[in-house]
Every structure is written in structure tokens, then in C-alpha cells.
């Protein structure tokens, strides 16, 4: 079984990559909402691919995970989602930011399902 510290570190790195990609798309390059949406979907697919490589490489099976460890890992994802929403709200208004975040999650999940079936 892989150590929980390593899983936590990998989830922090993936969250940082996602936040950095959204910040670059929204603030540095000042893309419109379509460009930011595309950057978020690509960042989600790339980070999912990286997580898949980590889990496949280490034959990761989490059977004995405690509730506090799972809460810590999920809090990293929740915190990065809040940071992404703040970045989008600063660049756009709140309804557009919520729409972009919701649409990117849906498009990324759809793209993952298509890529998984290939």
C-alpha cells in the first residue's frame, strides 16, 4: 500500500497545477470565457492523466484509509476549487464564474468517459 503522505502530496501538486493553469488563462493571457473553459478542461484531463500514472505505477489500493486522512485529501480538492472560483470571479462576474466551473466539470467528465472507452 502506498503511503498517505505521498497521496496527499500528489493531490496538492495536482491542485497547484490546476490553479496555476486557470490563473494563466484568466489573468495572464486574459482569455475570454471560452478560452478559460478550454484551459480548465485540458488542465483537468492532464491532471487526471498524471494521477492515473501515479496510481497505476504504484498499484495504489486504499483500503485502510481513516476518515481524517480522507478529509484532508478532500479538503485540498475543495480548497483548490474555491481558489479557482475566486480567480474566475475576479476575472468575470459570479454567475459567469459558476457557469464556467460547472461547464468545465461536465465537459471534462464527458471527455474522460470518451477517452476511457477508446
Image (cartoon, grey):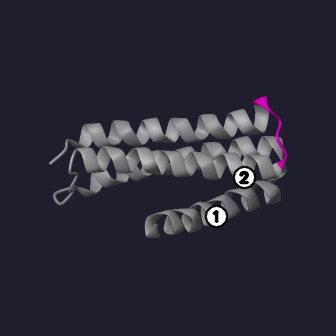
Q: Earlier in the sequence, mark 2 or mark 1?
A: 2
Task: Tell me the element at label 2.
Answer: helix
Q: Is residue 72 visible to the viewer in this orientation of the structure?
A: no
Residue 112, given in percent of the width and then of the height, sits at 51, 62
Residue designated by label 1: 107
Residue 74, given in percent of the width and then of the height, sits at 41, 53
- Which disc is residue 37 wearing? 2
The residue that appears at 24% across and 43% down in the rendered structure is 4
How many discs mark residues in the rendered view?
Answer: 2
Q: Residue furthest top?
A: 28
How would you classify the magenta stretch by its main secondary structure?
loop
> Residue 30 colored magenta?
yes
* Image-based side of 7 in relation to 95, left or right: left
Which sits in the foreground, 117 or 70?
A: 117
Residue neighbourhood size for the residue with mark 1, other residues' Cα within 10 Å, grouped as few (<14), some (14–19), many (≥20): some
* Image-based side of 107 in relation to 109, left or right: right
First to last magenta residue range: 28-32
Residue 63 lies in quadrant: bottom left
Q: Is mark 2 in CB contact (under 8 Å) with mark 1?
A: yes
Residue 18, given in percent of the width and then of the height, sits at 57, 41
Residue 80 lies in quadrant: top right
Task: Tell me the element at label 1.
Answer: helix
Amino acid at each position: 500500500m502506498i503511503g498517505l503522505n505521498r497521496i496527499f502530496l500528489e493531490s496538492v501538486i495536482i491542485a497547484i497545477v490546476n490553479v496555476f493553469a486557470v490563473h494563466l488563462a484568466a489573468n495572464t493571457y486574459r482569455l475570454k470565457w471560452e478560452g478559460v473553459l478550454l484551459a480548465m478542461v485540458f488542465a483537468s484531463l492532464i491532471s487526471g492523466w498524471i494521477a492515473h500514472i501515479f496510481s497505476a505505477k504504484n498499484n495504489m489500493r486504499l483500503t485502510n484509509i481513516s476518515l481524517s486522512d480522507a478529509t484532508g485529501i478532500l479538503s485540498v480538492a475543495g480548497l483548490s476549487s474555491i481558489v479557482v472560483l475566486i480567480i474566475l470571479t475576479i476575472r468575470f462576474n459570479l454567475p459567469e464564474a459558476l457557469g464556467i466551473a460547472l461547464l468545465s466539470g461536465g465537459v471534462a467528465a464527458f471527455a474522460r468517459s470518451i477517452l476511457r472507452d477508446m
